[in-house]
Image: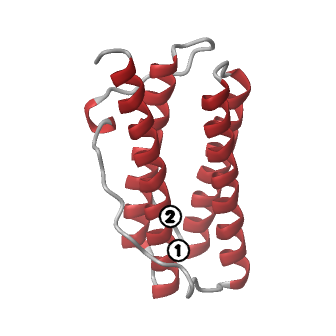
């Protein structure tokens, strides 16, 4: 990734959030399990909040003084899965693996963008997004673990 300006970096992050909204919205429409559908809708809503936060930051450069950082444990389940491509009607476990991997990559991206940020306010935005994506990854990995345990794994 080569960027010419901080606005280029923010535009890239905004576009990634838009893609995440579309991804989770699409999955929620296809999912047949009501609990999974609900979780996927919530993720789409969260990603939409991230998009709005980034747009607002880009336009106003407002800092996140009220945001509280906390450690999010990493179960590392997605670290041991391979990339898969979405297919309509794919099993729930594959949908979870796909989403976990996506959140893992988003977390990696925001960690890289922290290093590219040129001021503390921008670094804080990307650190906050790291935490948010880590939280999503943790939720998905926990759902995956619970689902696999119910299946006898």
Give the position of the N terminus as an image quadrant.
Answer: bottom left
124 or 14, which is in the foreground?
124
Task: Examine the rendered structure and indicate whether residue 23 appears above or below residue 113.
Answer: above
Q: How packed is label 2: few (under 14 Cα within 10 Å), some, or many (20 or more)?
A: many
Query: x%, y% of residue 71?
Result: 34, 66
Q: Residue 110 or 26: which is nearer the viewer?
A: 26
Task: Report which residue position mark 1 lands on.
Answer: 125
Quarter of the image holding residue 29?
top right
On screen, residue 40 above or below 74: above
Residues tagged 2 and 1 counted as in contact (Cβ below 8 A): yes
Residue at 65% x, 86% y: name it: 62
Q: In this view, does 63 lie above or below 5?
A: below
Disc 1 secondary structure class: helix
Quadrant location of residue 26?
top right
Residue shown at 31%/56% (left/top)?
Answer: 73
* Labelled disc at residue 140: none
Q: Dot 1, crowdedness within 10 Å: few (<14), some or many (≥20)? A: many
Taking the spot 45% from the left edge, 21% from the top edge, the residue there is 93
The percent coordinates of residue 4 (x first, y second) are 53, 70
Secondary element under disc 2, as helix, strand or loop, is helix
- Residue appearing at x 64%, y 54% in the figure: 46
Image coords of residue 138 (percent x, y): 40, 47
Give the number of marks: 2
The residue wearing badge 2 is: 129
How far is disc 2 from disc 1 in space, using C-alphas? 6 Å
């Amino acid at each position: 990734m080569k960027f010419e300006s901080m606005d280029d970096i923010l535009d890239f992050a905004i576009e990634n959030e838009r893609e995440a909204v579309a991804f989770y919205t699409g999955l929620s429409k296809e999912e047949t399990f009501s609990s999974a559908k609900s979780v996927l809708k919530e993720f789409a809503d969260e990603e939409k909040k991230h998009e709005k936060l980034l747009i607002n930051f880009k336009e106003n450069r407002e800092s996140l003084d009220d945001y509280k950082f906390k450690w999010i444990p990493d179960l590392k389940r997605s670290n041991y899965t391979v990339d898969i491509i979405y297919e309509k009607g794919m099993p729930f476990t594959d949908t979870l693996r796909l989403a976990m991997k996506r959140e893992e990559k988003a977390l990696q991206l925001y960690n890289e963008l922290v290093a590219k940020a040129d001021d503390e306010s921008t670094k804080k935005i990307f650190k906050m997004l790291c935490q948010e994506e880590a939280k999503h990854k943790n939720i998905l990995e926990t759902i995956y673990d619970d689902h696999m345990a119910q299946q006898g794994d």
